[in-house]
Image: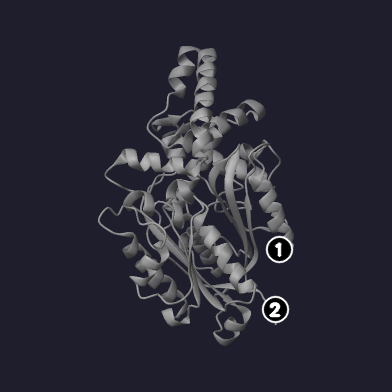
Amino acid sequence: MSNDVYILGVGMIKFGKYLDRSVKDLTGEALHSVLADCGLGPADLEAAWFSNSFWGMYTFQHSIRGQVALSANGLDGIPITNVENACASASTALNQAWAGIKAGLYDCVLAIGAEKLYDEDRVKVMRSFGAGVDVEEMAERMARWREDEQKRRAEAGPAGEAKEKAGGHSVFMDFYAAGARRHMEQYGTTQRQLAVIAAKAHNNSVLNPLAQYNFPQTVEQVLEDRPVAYPLTRAMCAPIGDGAAAAILVSERFLKSHPSSRAVRIRASVLKSGRRTGENDICGRTSRAAYEMAGVGPEDLDAIEVHDATAFGELYQTEQMGLCPPGRGGPLAESGATALSGRIPVNPSGGLISRGHPIGASGLAQIFELATQLRGEAGPRQIENPRLAMAENGGGTIGNGEAAMTIHILEKT
């Protein structure tokens, strides 16, 4: 018998703003959802990986977050591993759960992530995002960055300075904006192409009842929204949010004793880290390793969920994943190829931009979407007959790129 790993169940709550609910509460709803999805009970789970990034910073719940959140919902006694890997936390939990089954240690395990980002103290929320960098180097790096930006704005003149003023936002929006401007200078990418990507995300989320935002956006509305950091407007950037998502992974042996036509095979699970120096190539390195593990190429994919913390994030990663040549991510989106009815739909869920981005749950929300698509259960946003799907989830910043990245390739069975 092979040691293939399958996703037997997925669960997710509606992402949103839940000031009066706890992480324990959100975790419990996702746990109930994933168990109900595949007809299992807590006693079937042999181990669990719990993903969360900010609970400790907000309420000082450190060290044993998974044991606290899961035991409060009737799951304890089994091995529970806490996973914290910035925005890639949930997909890292999935990767480690996959590895546990792949190694033959378990037959049925849980990967679950939960996060609460909304708080009455907006300053605390924004400052917490600064933990996803090398904090010892950040002050020096930000000083250099501000100096470069002042020089750029001076060269652009008064009109350019007004255009590039930023609103209140996390430091990562400045990183993305700077990357977008470099891309525009090098390849001729336009702000309108970024708006096409953002409008697609918002319009897809209208069809997703679990998305944080359920309102449509035109390209013009995206362009006219409040500036964040040029060329990014608010509609091009992922919001903060609260939420939880989960997946139950099983071995082939377990699947034979619990047969299901809805199981999804994990063809590849790859986790890599960024490099302190050099180009931002982590997505290229990780996707190539995933393609090799799965024995497929980008041309074989039918659906993709990417980490679009901003519209530029989607544009850049589609290039890095080989969906198009470098510099052609904007024209790819403009052509309609990444729309729901296009050649290679990207972020059918609405992505982080519109489905929402509760840090510790986002990676598993991507898996929820792709498993739902491969099962043919996505309703009005269903992609036509998908067979292979890929999820890319990055987190934090080291050097010029993400500090961590996980890519999964899933297959319909």
Q: Give the SS element for disc 1.
A: helix
Q: Give the SS element for disc 2.
A: loop
Q: Which mark is residue 245?
A: none
Q: Are marks 2 and 1 in contact (CB under 8 Å)?
A: no
Circle 1 crowding by C-alpha within 10 Å: few under 14, some 14–19, many from 20: some
Q: If you read the primary sequence from the N terminus, does the residue marked by circle 2 or circle 1 appear first?
A: 2
Say above or below: 313 vs 370: above
Q: Amino acid at mark 2?
A: Ser
Q: Using the image as rendered, state which of residue 266 and residue 319 is in the foreground.
A: 266
Q: Is residue 156 visible?
A: yes
- Where in the figure is residue 199, as x and y percent of width and height? 47, 42
Q: Using the image as rendered, state which of residue 252 and residue 369 is in the foreground.
A: 252
Q: Amino acid at mark 1?
A: Ala
> Of all residues shown, which one is farthest toward the bottom?
257
Say above or below: 302 vs 412: above
Gap in angstroms between the C-alphas marked 2 and 1: 15 Å
Q: Which mark is residue 2?
A: 2
Q: Which residue is mark 1?
A: 294
Q: Is residue 382 visible?
A: no
Q: Using the image as rendered, state which of residue 377 and residue 315 is in the foreground.
A: 315
Colour convention of the picture = one colour
- Where in the figure is residue 257, as x and y percent of width and height? 57, 87
Q: Tell me which residue sits at (47%, 55%) in the image.
A: 362
Instruction: Work out which quarter of the rendered image holds the N terminus and state it.
Output: bottom right
Instruction: Work out which quarter of the rendered image holds the C terminus and state it.
Output: bottom right
Q: Using the image as rendered, state which of residue 219 and residue 27 is in the foreground.
A: 27
Q: Is residue 389 left or right of residue 396?
A: right
Q: Quadrant of residue 281?
A: top right
